[in-house]
Image (cartoon, rainbow, N blue to C red):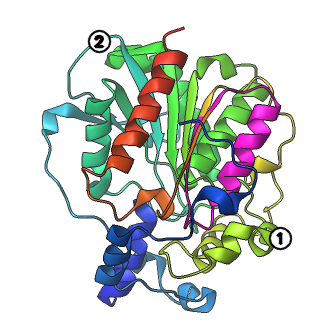
Amino acid sequence: MKRPVLLFFLCIILAGNQQVLFAQTCGTRQLDPRVGSFLKMIGNQNLTIEQLRKIPIARIRLAGPPLIPYPKEDVQRIKITADSIPVLIFNPVHGQNLPILIHYHGGGFILPLLPGIEHALWQDAKNYAAIVFAVDYRVAPENKFPAAVNDSYNAFKWIAAHGGEFGGDTSRIALTGNSAGANLVAVITQKAKKEGIVNKIKLQVLNGLPADCSPQNMETSVSYQENAKGYWQTKASCYFSVESYAPGQYKNPEVSPGLTEDLEGLPPAVIINAEFDPLRDDGISYAVKLRKNGVKVWEKCFAGQIHLLFGLPSNAEELKELETIVKAAMKESLNK
């Protein structure tokens, strides 16, 4: 596979309170120069849906961020439930009674939890003084919907019951997700509400949320049209991901959690959006709907940025601000 295509799919992985009435008011449509330089460096590709369909999934999965070493004694690798779902447990401080962050990775529902993102998860555990349980749910097209939902939900229930055995405080559980993982977090909280166990989840953190995966939304949403191509995450890649994952199920609330009307009683949410992200309006709309249902929301749309705030240096102020928002939400929600 040519390097630009590899980089395109690498990006799929890495993947304050603000009232926004119209999504286009997130910023002034000025791309952050650091991000612009990054896009030029990787040779940002605007592959069509037809081109994406021709790339073998196995070759796509060869892509991945570079490995960054971290202490191997800080992670445990286990398999849970009857489905042997792989879970990585990061506990850098080797503490007890720590908050639990159950993380669901991005990757368009087609990429597994790749080794290159482990360092970021280890870093999250350090930054938030928590134990991170990273769920390596089954992915499409081999395992279509609802496999990822089932794995994600069953892993949550298992961790809620057994997290204390690994040093976690099961009374302080937050779910975190990036992109496709954010979609799964939204679905899990809604399923937990239906089953009467949503009180086990104290906070949900949604970064780059695909809330409405229907073609109709992709063709009418302002952010999908403004950012259809040119900013790494494209409309075509969104189409490709969803058709690989849940063909014909786009209106199912467990695929498009933003279609659920009754969100009352869901846990507080942190919702992170980016101005140059096709999914921006999805996150903003979900935040509005949560608030209308009485759910506390911490929301930030980062002007000038792309999906998942990708392309920023690790010491960027925007990433520090994101961390500050999550810490504030954790302090208020997990310590009640």
- Callout 1 amino acid: Gln
Viewer-proximal residue, 154 or 121? 121
Q: Is residue 171 left or right of residue 131?
A: right
Task: Locate residue 334, reporting x and y percent.
Answer: 50, 16
Q: Residue at x 51, y 86 (%)?
A: 46
Q: Counting other residues with Cα less than 10 Å from the Cα at mark 1, is it few (<14), some (14-19), or many (20 or more)?
A: few
Q: Determine whether 123 is above or below 265 in the image.
A: below
Task: Locate residue 175, reporting x and y percent.
Answer: 52, 33
Viewer-proximal residue, 286 or 72? 286
- Callout 2 amino acid: Gln
Check residue 115 for magenta coloring. Answer: no
Task: Locate residue 258, reporting x and y percent.
Answer: 76, 49
Q: Is residue 65 left or right of residue 20?
A: left
Q: Which mark is residue 86?
A: none
Mark nearest the camera among 2 and 1 is 1
Q: Is residue 13 left or right of residue 120?
A: right
Q: Is residue 162 left or right of residue 72?
A: right
Viewer-proximal residue, 275 or 156? 275
Q: Is residue 87 visible?
A: no
The image quarter containing residue 295 is top right
Q: Which residues are magenta?
A: 270-297
Q: Residue at x 54, y 8 (%)?
A: 336
Alpha carbon distance from label 2 to label 1: 47 Å
Q: Which residue is mark 2?
A: 96
Q: Determine whether 39 is above or below 135 in the image.
A: below
Check residue 285 for magenta coloring. Answer: yes
- Which badge, 2 or 1, comes first in the chain's sequence? 2
The image quarter containing residue 130 is top left
Q: Quadrant of the N terminus?
A: bottom left
Give the residue at the far top of this rendering: 336
Q: Which residue is mark 1?
A: 216
